[in-house]
Amino acid sequence: MMSCREFSEIADSYLSDELLVETNHDLIHHLEQCRDCRGELNIRRQVRTKLRLAIINAEESTINSFFASNLKANLREQAKQKTLFSFRNLIFAPASFATIFLIVFGFFIYQNSSQNLAMWQKLSDEALETHKECAIEHKEEWLKNASVNSADKINFKEQILTPLKVKYNENIDLMDMHECYFHGKKYRHYVLKSGEHVVSYLQNETDNAIPTKLDANNDKILSQPREKFQLASFNGKMNPIFIISDMTEAENLNLARMIQNSPSI
Amino acid sequence: MFGFGKQDNFTEFEREAIPFLDDVYRVAYWLTRNQTEAEDLTQETFAQALKSFHNYEIGTNCKAWMMTIMYHTNSKRLRKMNRLQLVNDTEEKIAETISFEPSIPQNLTDVDVIAALKRVPKNFAEVVVLADVEGFAYKEVSQVLNVPIGTVMSRLHRGRKLLRVELADYARNYGFKIEKKVGEL
């Protein structure tokens, strides 16, 4: 049997319909027998109604109609902008992604070509040293050998030099051909003579061809002055090839192009 | 996507959420007890609701959803202003020590009722407003306030008791006779 005190504790939950069925049943049973508690419940119900009406009707907690209509207008505007923003995103998002992709891809390519260019510079430096230490240092020796014809020399003359003579009217003599090793790199070295100039045709047989375009003009030949020499480099079938001489840059580059275009290279 | 998904228009928001503008403002007022702050809070609540409307499932309790956003927004605002307070121990103790509940006369005016509610500490008054004025179930109040349901029940019990005491005080000022009920001393 529920006491009046117990009733008092749960009366509000009863009004809120938050009691368990059994407790509800006990409470109703108590109310049937207790007049005071019926009165108390009635008062609490009235207080709750009064509270609700008082708050709902209170001027201070009633929204200002001007503020309300302003807020609605702002929200409508906000929604419009959001829709517009979404629409713009729908259109521009692919373009943005493409731009980002191109930037990243471009950067990757730039990084890659920078690295390759650095590799070319290093190989060019080594080839130049070989030219100086071999072709220039032993110039007299090569001149003496110029008249000696070996099978390889004849082969090179036929495959490279004769076509140059026929096609470009370029008079180039082969003084010597040999294999030499400098700084741990193996070179197939053709020592050529163009007029008074000693020209080295150096095929680096240690390093593989570097798969990249060599200069901004995309002509696949990197031409650069080094000390008092001109150095032109390009990829052969398997290895990098260097043409080094003390001719002018145009002459050296021109010779390099003619050799590069030779069907045997 | 960016605010609107399946409910991809403002009309839906207008139909579901805007009707609760009055209720949100009213609760915001009782939460802040200041009209300007209540307007700011209402505005922030609706802006946030509009932004998150794609998360709302049509047909569920939109009023409770709005209230949850409002309480969350208010917590953020208070944190920003360093005004977030946990339930005050003193308030808990005051509520705890009330053992005598006077009867409440019926002739109180709305002004008395409002004034009495204002004298109830905010943490207790807010649950009373949510449950007894706005009609939320205990479970919904617990979700809105993000507190356990036991805490809601306890705060409600104390809040209602405090309100009754305050109302009785107003009645006493008008010269009503308050009689203690036997067994409640």
Image: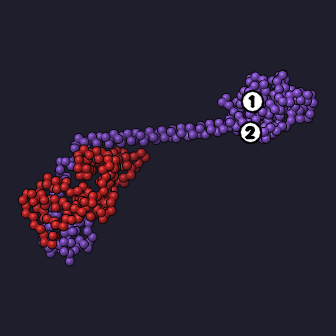
> In which quadrant of the rendered view does residue A227 lie?
top right
| Image depth: mark 1 or mark 2 in front | 1
Q: Colour of chain A?
A: purple
Residue A199 at what x, y percent from top left? 81, 28
Residue A56 can be seen, yes or no = yes
Look at 22% across and 74% down and name the residue there.
A26
- Percent coordinates x, y for residue B180 in the rendering: 12, 68
Secondary structure category for the residue under label 2 = loop
- Any mark on residue A232, and which? 1
Which residue is found at the position 22% from the left and 44% from the top? A64
Kind of residue sitting beneath label 1:
Ala
SS class, disc 1: strand
The image quarter in which residue A234 lies: top right
User: For this view, does B125 lie left or right of residue A247?
Assistant: left
| Left or right: B48, with A14 as reference point | right
The local crowd at label 1, few if under 14, some if 14 to 19, many if 20 or more residues have their Cα within 10 Å, is many
Which one is in front, A186 or A88?
A186
Of marks 1 and 2, which one's residue comes earlier in the chain? 2
Residue under the image location 33 percent in, 60 percent down: B147
Give me the disc on residue A136.
Answer: none
The red one among the chains is: B
**Looking at the picture, does residue A126 appear above or below residue A21?**
above
Q: Which residue is mark 2?
A: A209
Both labels 1 and 2 in a single chain? yes
C-alpha span from label 1 to label 2: 15 Å
Q: Which quarter of the image is occupied by the C terminus of chain B?
A: bottom left
In the image, taking residue A189 as reference, residue A103 lies left or right, namely: left
